[in-house]
Image: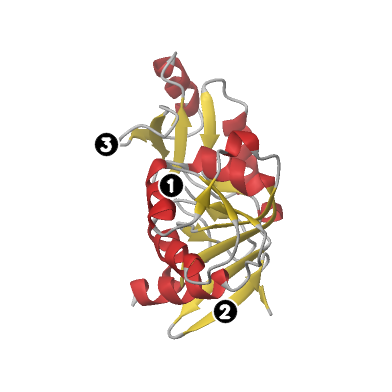
Amino acid sequence: MADHEKRVAARAAAELVEDKMSVGLGTGTTVAYFVPALAARRLDVRCAVTSPHTETLARGAGLRVERFSTVDRLDIAVDGADEVAPDGWLVKGGGGAHTREKLVASAADRFVVIVDSSKLVHALRPPVPLELLAFGLASTVRRIEAIGPVRRRDAARSPDRGVIYDYLGAVDDPRRLADALCGIPGVVEHGLFPPEMVTEVVVGRGGSAERLRPGGDGR
């Protein structure tokens, strides 16, 4: 059911893309459905990608990929999420690419999140992915542990060679936690995405797609 709902959400999001747009592509299983759905529309679009895996998918589908370092803004970015709270806060980074995903989402005029219905939660919960610099890693981890417990993920490094950890403490106040993590030297990025970054969430629910605004209002 989850895969079917991801496909439904991906197809609905692909319909939001128009000819001549610049499009940011996230990373993960839901984006893997979005890429062929977008390619099937045969639009003239330019794509910026967040990971080597997504680049391989996009090029294989016939989409035009440009280096994000040469792009200063995007018309739209589409990505999945691990959790979506009613107020629009997200947890992302299950694939370890959340730094690039946040950069691409921030550069887009519209950031559209595509998920299956299981990703909607009443409140955010751990883990929250972290990307840390390898330099000074032990001291960075010690400072994070003053906030809450962390665990190194048994996974490859990020696309930019950052070390991936997971924050395992409470996420009762996402904004306060995000600010605290941002204030620790050595933390490259965390997986908390604020609602003001999100334009809308497209949710696959059964055989249909539901469009939600941050805060939980559908339309």
Residue 145 rendering spot, x and y as whole percentages: 45, 28
**Image mark count:** 3
Q: Give whichever of 69, 153 is nearer the camera.
A: 69
Q: Mark 1 points at which residue?
A: 55
Q: Mark 2 points at which residue?
A: 210
Do tag 2 and tag 1 residues touch (Cβ < 8 Å)? no
Q: 31 left or right of 45?
A: left
Quadrant including the N terminus = bottom left
Mark 3, other Cα within 10 Å: few <14 / some 14–19 / many ≥20: few
Question: Disc 3 residue type?
Answer: Asp
The image quarter containing residue 196 is bottom right
- Note whether residue 94 is visible: no
Which type of secondary structure does the marked residue at label 3 adopt?
Answer: loop
Residue 100 rendering spot, x and y as whole percentages: 53, 40
Residue 25 rendering spot, x and y as whole percentages: 52, 53
The Cα atoms of the two marked residues, 3 and 1, are separated by 24 Å
Q: Name the residue under label 3.
A: 154
Say how the picture is coloured.
secondary structure
Q: Is residue 219 above or below residue 136?
A: below
Q: Which residue lies furthest to the bottom in this view?
A: 207
Residue at the (66%, 40%) spot, across then down: 71
